[in-house]
């Protein structure tokens, strides 16, 4: 099978490679993503995608900073999950530097915080603040049980580049959160019954 590539398409690929190498060079020269954005006018997604495979040691302090930057400025991190009757949404709260979650299953709704690398530690504290039970009795529906439970999970202390961090967040972090919130939801429903 033959593919025909137009000269315009070849020029776009070449232009993209040139932009990527310019962004990478600016980053290697010590400019952060905000300065690169200011210099080039490129969107944050483009800047991040240009440097995502660049070798850099991302420790827990940098991990916290990068998660905040990625979540707040790009669409590269998972923000919503819908799986097997479970809905989960993540929201970054800029003022406090935390990730909020809302987890809803057939039993109820959990809300709280789950910020990876909180306080630059290699941990994921999952703080559940509220549990709203979905009762068949309409008088009890939506009752806030006000739990304040915390689970702290050890997480990786080092990533070699942004691609690894993004992959960890979109897969391992999401899975850790879903598993632990499912357990919390089930323990709360047993407490209520």
Image (cartoon, rainbow, N blue to C red):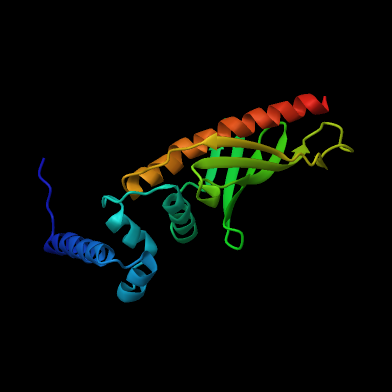
Q: Residue furthest right?
A: 139
**Image spot of residue 94 (x, y percent):** 57, 61
Q: Residue at x 61, y 59 (%)?
A: 96
Near-viewer residue (6 or 21): 21
Judge whether 92 appears above or below 8 on screen.
above
Residue 128: name its quadrant.
Answer: top right
Whether residue 132 sits left or right of residue 41 in the image: it is right
| Quadrant that contains the N terminus | top left
Q: Residue at x 69, y 31 (%)?
A: 185
**Image spot of residue 86 (x, y percent):** 61, 35
Q: Is residue 83 visible?
A: no
Whether residue 83 sits left or right of residue 54 in the image: it is right
Residue 192: name its quadrant.
Answer: top right
Near-viewer residue (165 or 120): 120
Judge whether 130 appears above or below 18 on screen.
above
Q: Residue at x 42, y 53 (%)?
A: 62
């Amino acid at each position: 099978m033959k593919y025909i590539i137009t000269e315009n398409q070849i020029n776009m690929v070449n232009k993209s490679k040139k932009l990527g190498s310019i962004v990478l060079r600016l980053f290697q020269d010590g400019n952060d993503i905000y300065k690169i954005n200011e210099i080039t006018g490129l969107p944050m997604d483009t800047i991040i995608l240009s440097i995502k495979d660049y070798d850099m040691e991302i420790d827990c302090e940098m991990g916290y900073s990068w998660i905040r930057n990625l979540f707040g400025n790009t669409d590269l991190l998972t923000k919503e999950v819908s799986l097997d009757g479970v809905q989960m949404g993540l929201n970054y709260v800029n003022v406090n530097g935390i990730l909020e979650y809302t987890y809803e299953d057939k039993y109820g709704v959990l809300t709280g915080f789950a910020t990876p690398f909180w306080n630059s530690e290699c941990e994921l504290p999952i703080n559940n603040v509220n549990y709203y039970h979905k009762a068949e009795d309409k008088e009890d529906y939506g009752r806030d049980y006000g739990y304040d439970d915390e689970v702290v999970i050890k997480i990786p202390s080092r990533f070699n580049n942004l691609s690894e961090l993004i992959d960890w967040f979109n897969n391992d972090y999401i899975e850790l959160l879903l598993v632990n919130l499912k357990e919390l939801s089930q323990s709360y429903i047993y407490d209520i019954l």
